[in-house]
Amino acid sequence: MKTPLGIPATLGADSLHSELRSLISASRQRLAGAVNAELTRLYWAVGERLHREVLGGERAAYGSMVIDHLGTRLAAEFGRGFEAKNLHRMVQFAQAFPDAEIVATLSRQLNWSHIVTLLPLKDSEARRFYAQAIATEGWSVRELRRRIEQKTFERTALASSQGTGIDQALAHTESSGQLSPGLVFKDPYFLDFLGLRQGYDEADLENAILRQLEAFILELGRGFAFVERQKRMVIDGDDFYLDLLFFHRRLRRLVAVELKLGRFKAGHKGQMELYLKWLDKYERQPNEEAPIGLILCAEASREQVELLQMQQDGITVAEYWTELPPKEELERHLHQALIEARERLAARRVLMAPGRAGDELGEGEG
């Protein structure tokens, strides 16, 4: 057999072609990444300069007119990428991410389309969350838009408020380069795709999840791998059954999931603690971290969850919704829930601050 050029096609030639093809593709990818990083840093520098020199102080009144004029001139010299509307986006970029060091890191991980998608977000913590997710999970722009539409940040922030909060979870991930468990779970989970009818029981819920396992894992988030349903545990001669068992690849942990039809009850914590202790003793591998648990309830009982300090024991409680309200109602609900969660977290941090307990005791003695 011969190639189109008449050269004999040997096994060695095919192997060499494959190797050279891989080298060329890898080089092109690195080159594209370097170009993207340089463009991102350039856009930030342009935006920062315009914000500081044109839109700051007394010049703010006519700054927009100046940018329009500069956009016309720069676009004529360097192309449409520097039109006025894009210059305004660069200014927004510099305002949203004022730290040059953070921008230098982002430039290696996000492209300009990612950044433009993040700019309309008003919450700086949300921008930080999504930027970190893009960097660690490799989201495309399409995936990013889908996650924003599904309120992934708000739901993750609500779940993490049971522990140290999403700000500390992000700080841990950024400093260590390792995913924090505080960024893994959400509250609530949207399970409208299950198509459950009124009157379903826990077995119906579990079976529906297994029928739609791919969609369920997509809602859980990247990194989850299904291990087993109705995991049998024998303790003191009695049989116990865990509803669903997953493994999270990036956390390197088993994740136990229990499904509850009604409201969360304090007794559910003890049950999950027992399951996690058993998994830690009998199923955990030498290179794995300690198992963690997720209790999915129809209603979360916020005060009980807060008093029990569930996340200190590696347990998160979250609601699941089998039907979603209209978009505006959903946004209002999550917005208000997030405000209340942040207030509870702030109050908890005040109580846990060093010296706080001693000050209160001192006041009482007086």
Image (spheres, rainbow, N blue to C red):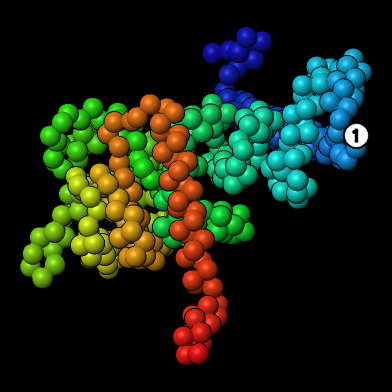
- Quadrant of residue 314 within the rendered picture: bottom left
Residue 210 as seen in the image, left or right of residue 327: left
Q: Residue furthest front?
A: 366
Count of numbered circles in the view: 1
Q: Position of residue 144 (x, y in %)?
A: 54, 32
Seen from the viewer's position, the closer of residues 354 and 31 is 354
Can the viewer see residue 78?
A: no
* Rendered residue at 36%/61% (across/down): 306
State which quarter of the image contains the N terminus. Answer: top right
Q: Position of residue 157 (x, y in %)?
A: 48, 48
**Residue 31 to residue 10: above or below:** below
Q: Residue furthest bottom?
A: 365
Residue 262 as seen in the image, left or right of residue 45: left
* Rendered residue at 48%/59% (across/down): 345
* Rendered residue at 70%/40% (across/down): 96
Question: Quick one: label 1, few (<14), some, or many (20+) residues within 10 Å?
Answer: few
Q: Residue furthest left?
A: 237
Can the viewer see residue 316?
A: yes
Q: Position of residue 184 (x, y in %)?
A: 44, 49
Seen from the viewer's position, the closer of residues 240 and 13 is 240
Name the kind of residue labelled 1 in the image: Arg
* Rendered residue at 23%/65% (across/down): 270
Residue bearing the label numbered 1:
59
Q: Of helix, strand and loop, which one carries label 1? A: helix
Residue 207 as seen in the image, left or right of residue 226: left
- Quadrant of residue 80 within the rendered picture: top right
Seen from the viewer's position, the closer of residues 340 and 279 is 340
